[in-house]
Image (cartoon, rainbow, N blue to C red):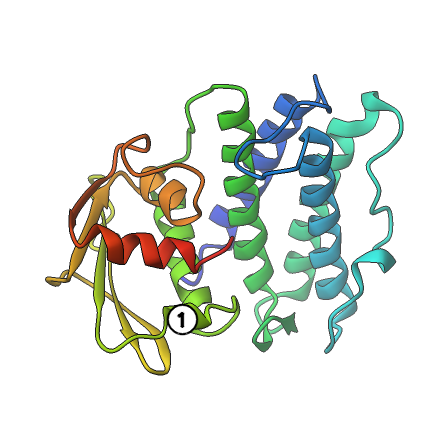
Amino acid sequence: MSETSDERFFAELRDCTARLARITGGDLGRPVPSCPGWTFKQLATHLGRGHRWAAEIVSTRTTTPIPMREVPDGKLPADPAQHESWLNAGADLVVDAVTAAGSGGQAWTFVGMRPASFWARRRAHEAAVHLADAELATGQPVDLDADVAADAVDEWLGMLSDGRVPADGLRGDGQTLHFHATDPGLSGTGEWLVTRTSAGAGVEPGHAKADVAVRGPATGLLLVLTRRQPAPDAGVDVLGDQALLDHWLGNTPF
């Protein structure tokens, strides 16, 4: 996705949130195997509160993080009939806050002050991955657009390389991993070369030979890289050093 695709992120954010709301609304006690220890109640609360947290950060133009406990309306309503509207309202709050901030608006992020649109992307992909959690928990196929899933992979790899996600175990001495989303129509945006160095993991876009190649649909790659499914279950092929991929996954908590 391009840096100017806020509308695409808004659509993803709203769609994935709405779909998760419909799935989780029927049985809040259902376990979520891909989030050990969670039920649908925790999944819905986590997503809805997180949306409101991001919206509050953007709307107040804060330069420091806001404690999650201070987020307005951050609890899942006691009335199950209100759960779907509460989740969808959280997505709308993010969209409204980012829109109001405009192209020049800045807000706190995990890596310092950044354009408010950072949070449109972050919350859209958070919703996509947790929608996948809900779909997997109910035995449904994970259904994400290829461009959405590929950009979520791109964001996740970027978060690991720039320190937004602690991943000290990814340091190395030149080991390489190549991730390749094979969906048609990605226009060259679906390949990444990761190099483990003494400073951490470096990520570059594009095709290259590597110690291990991980190839498959963008949605499958996302599920593997966020440790939602093993590669065979996600329709992803692993060519080369399987132990290197296992080490990567073991040191990249989502």
As drawn, is 182 to the left or to the right of 6? Answer: left
Which residue sits furthest bottom? 199
Q: Is residue 225 left or right of residue 54?
A: left
On the image, which quarter does residue 217 sit in?
top left
Does 153 sit left or right of 214 as displayed? right
> What residue do we see at 70% from left, 44% from top?
46
Q: Front-most of 41 and 79?
A: 41
Classify mark 1: helix, strand or loop. Answer: helix
Residue 116 image position (x, y, % from top left): 61, 66
The answer to whether residue 94 is above or below residue 146 is below
Q: Is residue 189 visible?
A: no
Q: Quarter-wise, where is residue 145 in the image?
A: top left
What residue is rendered at 34% in x and 48% in y?
150
Q: What residue does disc 1 label?
A: 161
Residue sitting farthest toward the left? 209
Q: Amino acid at mark 1?
A: Ser
Compared across the picture, whether 253 is left or right of 58 comes to left
Name the residue rendered at 69%, 58% in the picture.
54
- Quarter of the rendering occupied by the N terminus: bottom left
Label 1 crowd (10 A; few <14 / some 14-19 / many >=20): many
The one nearer the camera, 123 or 163, is 163
Q: Position of residue 7 (x, y in %)?
A: 51, 49
Q: Position of residue 205 (x, y in %)?
A: 25, 65
Task: State the residue in front, 239 or 59.
Answer: 239
